Image (cartoon, rainbow, N blue to C red):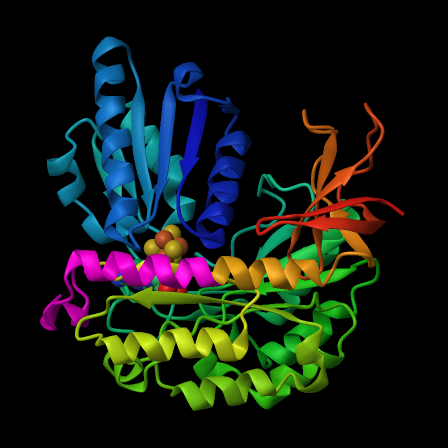
Amino acid sequence: MKFHIETWGCQMNDHDSEKLSGMLVREGHEAVGSVAEADLVLLNTCSIREKAVHKVHSQLGRLRELKAQRPLLIGVAGCLAQQEQEALFKQAPHVDFVLGTMALQQLPRLLEEAKAGRRVMDTAEYPDNHLFPPEVTQRRSTAKALVTIMEGCDHACTYCVVPTTRGPERSRPVADILDEVKLMVEQGFREVELLGQNVNSYAGGCSFAELIERVSEVDGLEWIRFTTSHPMNFTRELGRTLATNPKVAPFLHLPIQSGSNSVLKRMLRGYTVEEYLERLGYLGEARERFAISTDFIVGFPGETDEDFEGTMAVLEQVRFDASFSFIYSPRPGTPALRLSDDIPAQVKAQRLARLQKRQTELTLASHEKAVGKILEVRVESLTVTEQGHWLARTGRWENVHLTVGAGRTLPFGSLVRARITGAGPHFLRGELA
Ligand code: 5AD
Ligand code: SF4
């Protein structure tokens, strides 16, 4: 079959799509670039906020029209599949199969059944889901290889669907992870991103900090990234490793969510603002080198003006280099549903706009500090873009538009030295040094 996978959501979902794609290729199917060319469309969905769910449903609507005109198999995977399960068949009767987030390796079987005309679902929790064979994965990035180290989340943040959609924490054994990292380096990757819903609570035979040390010993590997971290599990040991291991890229995404202790308490985040700041301090002198990014939720139930000022204050205090901010979205089955969603939509929108405006200024100021420097950057594009530059990233995860001569190519994922010549809020400009 010709298949097309559409992916929403986080890096974990991106990587799941690489695994799904790999299984389909292994079974002899062919990846195509669009829905129009495909006879199997697989939607790998996200349900973190209402908006993400809307996008899936509108795509399902378009696929229904297409399926009325020609044969088409439609599968739904990912967090919405895990959350809705058979309800998805009711909402969208043209869906042929539903594949849960913890049953990835059941895809070939479900597809066979669906091809035989049976509508099927598997949303069970398979104990080996996180032990996916790395040689099967079809990697899409040419610059960094995504490597699962753990799956699931044992926290219980009151707004979040992830504990339901991704299940309890399961860690991959250290040896498996090291084997995959070595394989990636053999295949030409020089950078890995260690993935998990909560990488700091890694428990596959050593601590997360030790895992980083072990991974860094792989010859030929240049940069290690990881996502995503929970401040509650951010240890002094981890701070020390990040600060001292030369292969750790100087970028830390540590979601704070709010700058108000009473909101954090209602979110059940398990730390105060002061404790969050203390954990950032674990980076010691390396704090200056590191770009720090975070996530914020505004308009959480009961968030007063004063609470929101706390969020603005922490933004100012930390001077985050980047942040992702969202309006609170009530999610099915989450404890926060018991709190009344009492902040007027207009107030939420104003708070979000104010936060984002200030963040844009801070990001610009952070980018401007790079101007005039010569930095090592990893080239992400294989060829020159239409605008005449390569896309590249600094260790701090800043986008760089790198001006080069027309028609030049590079081996994928190369590190080059770039002279930074300009800065905007979304990217740096540079030239080969
Ligand atoms: N509403 C709004 N934002 C949410 N996030 C998670 N759940 C919700 C929700 N119900 C945000 C958090 C998290 C990021 C991935 O998405 O900020 O860190
Ligand atoms: Fe979306 Fe969260 Fe699922 Fe990632 S884990 S796809 S962000 S709901």
The picture places residue 176, in percent across and down from the top left corner, at 62, 63
Q: Which residues are magenta?
A: 330-358
Q: Quarter for ligand 1? A: bottom left
Work out whether residue 113 can be spotted: no
Q: Is residue 326 left or right of residue 290?
A: left
Q: Which of these two is toward me, 253 or 142?
A: 253
Residue at point 58% right, 39% down?
138
Q: Is residue 290 magenta?
A: no
Q: Which of these two is toward me, 427 or 73?
A: 427
Residue 276's place in the image compared with 58, above or below, is: below
Residue 214's place in the image compared with 186, above or below, is: below
The picture places residue 65, in percent across and down from the top left corner, at 22, 17
The picture places residue 290, in percent across and down from the top left corner, at 66, 71
Q: Residue furthest right?
A: 433
Q: Which of these two is toward me, 63 or 107?
A: 63
Residue at point 50% right, 72% down?
254
Q: Is residue 254 left or right of residue 381?
A: left
Quadrant where the N terminus is found in the figure? top left
Q: Is residue 357 left or right of residue 93?
A: right
Residue 423's place in the image compared with 204, above or below, is: above
Q: Which of these two is toward me, 167 or 377?
A: 377
Q: Residue furthest top?
A: 69
Residue at point 49% right, 64% down?
196
The picture places residue 403, in percent across and down from the top left corner, at 79, 36
Residue 191 picture quarter: bottom right
Q: Is residue 355 left or right of residue 30?
A: left
Work out whether residue 310 can be spotted: yes
Q: Main secondary structure of the magenta part?
A: helix
Residue 340 picture quarter: bottom left
Q: Is residue 349 magenta?
A: yes
Residue at point 71% right, 80% down?
286
